[in-house]
């Protein structure tokens, strides 16, 4: 299995604060991987390490087995605020991209995509809406025909229809050219339809990672009589529990064998899974303690 991104004990700190710590990660080639986690979890830091904009303070990150800076021609990156030269038109940016990426540049792909989305070719991109600018940035990144595409919150500024279109275009790009995508986002429902790999970051650490179908298969929501701390047959771990007076609802990781029939089993959604794992890790909100407020 070829790995597009691999991190081993990867860490990055700003001053004395670790933005990313002990990060162990493997993104197999050909996947659309979602990088999720609360604000400040370390998503942008991880993407910047993978594209060589930052150097690790601990461990290492490899892209297709190599130092990120040595594979830049094969990597497309769209930063969080979609920085584009605002005085240039979209058409000029497509032409400029061709001059900067002489090895491989599919200008026709970018033009066709921007035309289909109704993006005016002759207006400075600074005068386009935030969502339109995000579409221009994606079209330019796809024109590079990258083996790995890193996107930092690409759909945050898009309307629901544009979000769906954007994710479908990504899936198309992956299917056509075997591009691997690693994208950060807070919009879990949009990711569920299109991402096949998940990485959850929380407070600078990887909280959960793996193939989405395996993660969904190995987790269940159980509803049953109010539970104490006793173990349940067929359950390896209770990730999150909530209780009413008579009933408990548990999000669990399955173990070996069937689950105790006393419990009703339900499949989990990606959103259930992520929120349960994030809640599990947030016992003491860091911000509250450092504000001098009781947690
Ligand atoms: N240039 C910097 N200088 C100092 N601290 C930084 C810097 N960039 C990020 N950090 C800190 O590193 C941590 C991780 O930040 P990062 O931007 O990677 O998080 P994120 O998950 O991308 O957040 P968001 O969802 O808000 O974009 C945060 O605590 C942040 O305050």
Image (tube, rainbow, N blue to C red):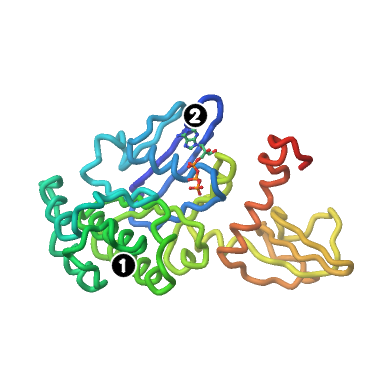
Is the CB of mark 1 within 8 Å of ligand 1?
no
Q: Is residue 77 left or right of residue 212?
A: left
Mark linked to residue 74: none
Q: Secondary structure at mark 2?
A: strand
Q: Position of residue 162 (x, y in %)?
A: 37, 70
Q: Position of residue 164 (x, y in %)?
A: 40, 71
What residue is pinned by disc 1? 169
Q: Residue at x 72, y 45 (%)?
A: 283
Contact? badges 2 and 1 (CB < 8 Å) = no
Nearer-the-camera pick, 103 or 208: 103
Q: Quadrant of residue 31?
A: bottom left
Q: Which residue is mark 2?
A: 14
Q: Residue at x 50, y 60 (%)?
A: 212
Instruction: Estimate the x, y position of residue 76 in percent, counting from the top left.
Output: 27, 49
Give the vertical position of 262 relative to 91 (above or below).
below
Where, by quadrant of the figure, is residue 220 drawn? bottom right
Q: Is residue 178 visible?
A: no
Q: Above or below — where is 19 with respect to 243?
A: above
Q: Earlier in the sequence, mark 2 or mark 1?
A: 2
Q: Classify mark 1: residues with Cα within 10 Å, few (<14), some (14-19) or many (20+).
A: some
Q: Is residue 98 above or below residue 218?
A: above
Query: How far, Cα to Cα, is label 2 from label 1?
Result: 36 Å
Q: Does the beta carbon at disc 2 come under 8 Å from ligand 1?
A: yes
Q: Quadrant of the C terminus?
A: top right
Q: Is residue 137 above or below residue 168?
A: above
Residue positioned 31% across, 49% down in the render: 83
Instruction: Identify the secondary structure beneath mark 1.
Output: helix
Measuring from the top left, give residue 73's x and y in whole percent: 21, 43
The reply, left or right, for residue 183 in relation to residue 278 is: left
Picture quadrant of residue 259: bottom right
Q: Is residue 121 left or right of residue 16?
A: left
Q: Is there any visible trace of residue 278 in the rendered image? A: yes
């Amino acid at each position: 299995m070829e790995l597009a991104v691999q991190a081993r004990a990867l860490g990055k700190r700003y001053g004395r604060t670790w933005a990313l710590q002990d990060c162990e990660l493997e993104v197999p080639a050909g996947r659309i991987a979602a990088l999720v986690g609360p604000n400040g979890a370390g998503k942008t830091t991880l993407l910047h390490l993978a594209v060589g904009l930052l150097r690790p303070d601990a461990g290492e990150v490899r892209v297709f087995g190599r130092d990120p800076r040595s594979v830049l021609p094969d990597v497309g990156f769209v930063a969080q605020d979609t920085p584009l030269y605002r005085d240039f038109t979209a058409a000029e940016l497509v032409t400029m991209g061709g001059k900067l990426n002489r090895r491989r540049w599919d200008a026709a792909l970018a033009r066709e995509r921007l035309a289909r989305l109704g993006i005016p070719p002759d207006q400075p991109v600074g005068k386009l809406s935030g969502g339109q600018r995000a579409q221009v940035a994606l079209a330019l990144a796809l024109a590079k025909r990258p083996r790995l595409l890193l996107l930092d919150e690409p759909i945050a500024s898009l309307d629901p229809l544009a979000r769906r279109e954007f994710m479908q275009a990504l899936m198309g790009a992956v299917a056509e050219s075997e591009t691997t995508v690693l994208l950060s986002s807070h919009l879990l429902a949009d990711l569920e339809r299109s991402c096949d790999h998940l990485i959850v970051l929380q407070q600078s650490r990887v909280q959960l990672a793996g193939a989405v179908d395996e993660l969904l298969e190995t987790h269940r929501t159980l509803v049953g009589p109010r539970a104490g701390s006793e173990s349940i047959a067929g359950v390896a771990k209770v990730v999150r529990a909530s209780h009413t007076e008579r009933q408990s609802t548990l999000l669990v990781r399955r173990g070996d064998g069937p689950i105790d029939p006393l419990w009703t089993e339900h499949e989990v959604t990606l959103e259930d899974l992520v929120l349960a794992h994030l809640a599990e890790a947030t016992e003491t909100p860091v911000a509250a303690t450092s504000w001098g407020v009781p947690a």
